[in-house]
Image (cartoon, coloured by chain):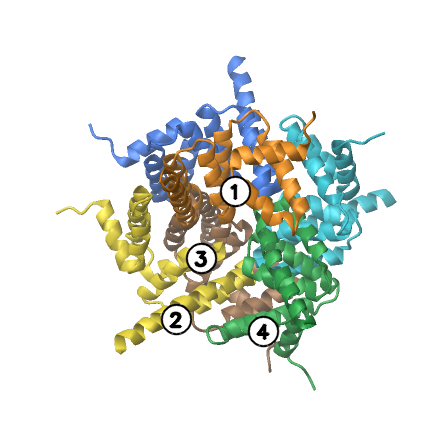
Chain colours: A green, B cyan, C yellow, D brown, E blue, F orange
Amino acid sequence: MVQNRLERGLEMMDRVVGPSAHHVQDSLADIAPDLGRLLAEYFGDIYGRSGLDRKSREIVTVAALTALGKLPQLKVHIKAAIHVGCTEEEIIELLMQMVLYAGFPASLNGVAIAKEVFCEINQEGEGTNA
Amino acid sequence: MVQNRLERGLEMMDRVVGPSAHHVQDSLADIAPDLGRLLAEYFGDIYGRSGLDRKSREIVTVAALTALGKLPQLKVHIKAAIHVGCTEEEIIELLMQMVLYAGFPASLNGVAIAKEVFCEINQEGEGTNA
Amino acid sequence: MVQNRLERGLEMMDRVVGPSAHHVQDSLADIAPDLGRLLAEYFGDIYGRSGLDRKSREIVTVAALTALGKLPQLKVHIKAAIHVGCTEEEIIELLMQMVLYAGFPASLNGVAIAKEVFCEINQEGEGTNA
Amino acid sequence: MVQNRLERGLEMMDRVVGPSAHHVQDSLADIAPDLGRLLAEYFGDIYGRSGLDRKSREIVTVAALTALGKLPQLKVHIKAAIHVGCTEEEIIELLMQMVLYAGFPASLNGVAIAKEVFCEINQEGEGTNA
Amino acid sequence: MVQNRLERGLEMMDRVVGPSAHHVQDSLADIAPDLGRLLAEYFGDIYGRSGLDRKSREIVTVAALTALGKLPQLKVHIKAAIHVGCTEEEIIELLMQMVLYAGFPASLNGVAIAKEVFCEINQEGEGTNA
Amino acid sequence: MVQNRLERGLEMMDRVVGPSAHHVQDSLADIAPDLGRLLAEYFGDIYGRSGLDRKSREIVTVAALTALGKLPQLKVHIKAAIHVGCTEEEIIELLMQMVLYAGFPASLNGVAIAKEVFCEINQEGEGTNA
């Protein structure tokens, strides 16, 4: 059976971004459902392309969001980067590199978000292990 | 013999950025030589670190500069990305991906710079082959 | 009797922006009263001009603030847009359109603010009806 | 016969943006044709929606591009704004209003682009009349 | 005789910004004369205040324009900074400092503009001396 | 005994930025200690230079951070500005001036941060006097 663009997009968001994808969609459901649909479809359009592996796609996203200071989305995509296989060390490295291109404030604000994400992940990990 | 931070940085810029590194240094030589020195040293500090491979470092730089619209530096780093092994296809892919995070204008301006760089490279290639 | 620029500006802010105008002025009263005065005067200078109707003035302001990510002011001006006659649907439409020009993060952050504003308005409405 | 998303998008760009739409597509044809396709499709997705009239869509775009300083695209969309019925006076009014929200430099750079566009249009007009 | 806000503003622009002030006003005269008037009046409002000396006012303007990448205005205000007594060395120092807060691209683009300005000034100086 | 770059940098941060410098270093200690080290070293490199006095260095930093909307760092550097001798009046003056170059939202967000800082300082002052 043919899968439509929306279904493909939602599945791709789920695979790349993980559980945060649902939170984003849920937050749009009552106020701007069409924006949620476009987000899923466009995400699927781009991430469904070959030519750049998924891990590279997430690190460039993290870099762009850090440079632009889009912090809520940076949080989602640091989680996504880890979800597709980046290590915490790699994320810190790229946030440090942003010092050269966007200055210390962009980099420091990015590291503060990374710290939140790493803490949440470690707490979940401990919760699971207990 | 011990190599100092400046020498290491200049060597690293040379290895990663290629010939454009010299143009940047030359343009600063008479007006702000200390800025040229700091650029080389800080570049060496960051790119000399392990934890992220050189190709990944260049694609995140290209992404950040595209998002920020810093076009002269984007030109330098698209060249650098190719210099360290990125393909033209990979660069176009990441510039397209920026549509999602920074909008079409950022992406289109990035592609216009990429076009200039790819043309220059192809002309040089033809020149060499002739 | 002649009304001076400050009085005209405050009256214009009141008419366009509604109650939030007073909160902005109050927040500046003890720390930077002259900034409050300039804000009112310059607002009056611009919004007092013919050549663009008040509703158009507010939607372009909402667009600019969304693109720039100036969220506290975006909240004030989404309220103002509704105050001068924009519908919630029109505001969501323009926030969605920002995807094309500033990317999803700008648009999503704008929608989150719109959601806050619409909730506050609906609660006030219910309070009034009770 | 069913028109697909790409055809609808190209037609919409043609109707809203006018001849500049073709220049943008042509400039992408050899370097990033898929970006050209996505641009048309997404443009069609957004501008094909009801809820905001075409003239309002163009003035918010001009405002956002002025605030962000995306000058090549601002040129395209000032032309588009005129193409869908905005007057030169309305465009100058909104560029002036940006002083309040993005400062004089954003506004002055926008006016410089508007000047170029108005000159081109007037020259074409004279050419046609001759 | 009472001097009005516009006259005071134009005089202040003349005193602080020097000859470039006239170029800005001239460029606006036929397309957006009211924007030229507001620019002069608001400039006069701010620069006419006590509380910060003129030289400090110009170095903070140069810093802000460098950080924001507003290059045409940066050129005007580097000239203005020299006009009110800043040395070339002081300007280079502050452009270098921007590396920390806005990254190398902002700083390098600022230095490129400073180089243009210093060259123009030196050529004029030689012309005068000849 | 020779003091190394890190020690010099930390001492300089301490002298210019005051107690906030330690909070920044502490927040990085467990997540990105090398970024803390680079911050101190680069800060020392720049602020250790002659050519611009310390007070001028802090006011240009406050201006740049206001223009860029980097609010957590703006808070740190408004405190630093006061620490090196700026008056509250001078800070408000420069934040007001930013209206011209970055618009009211940047300026108003800066004043809100200044208000927080001035309140904290006054409370500490009262605490000390009690």
Q: Position of residue F54 (x, y in %)?
A: 51, 29
Is the N terminus of chain D in the top left, top right, bottom left or bottom right quadrant? bottom right
The disc at residue F20 is: 1
In primary-sequence order, the first of circles 2 and 3 is 3
Q: Residue at x 56, y 42 (%)?
A: F22
Query: Looking at the picture, do discs 2 and 4 lie on one chain?
Result: no
Residue C35 visible? The answer is: yes
C-alpha span from label 2 to label 3: 17 Å
Q: Amino acid at mark 2?
A: Cys
Q: Secondary structure at mark 1?
A: helix
**Quadrant of the rendered image containing residue B128:** top right
Label 4 marks a residue whose chain is A
Disc 1 to disc 3: CB gap under 8 Å: no
The disc at residue A22 is: 4
Mark in front: 1 vs 3: 1
Q: Amino acid at mark 4?
A: His
Q: Position of residue E80 (x, y in %)?
A: 45, 29
Disc 1 packing (10 Å; few <14; some 14–19; many ≥20) = some
Q: Which residue is mark 3?
A: C71
Q: Residue at x 34, y 42 (%)?
A: E38
C-alpha span from label 2 to label 1: 38 Å
Residue D79 visible? The answer is: no
Disc 4 to disc 3: CB gap under 8 Å: no
Q: Position of residue F115 (x, y in %)?
A: 38, 46
C-alpha span from label 1 to label 4: 38 Å
C-alpha span from label 1 to label 3: 26 Å
**Quadrant of the rendered image containing residue E32:** top left
Label 3 marks a residue whose chain is C
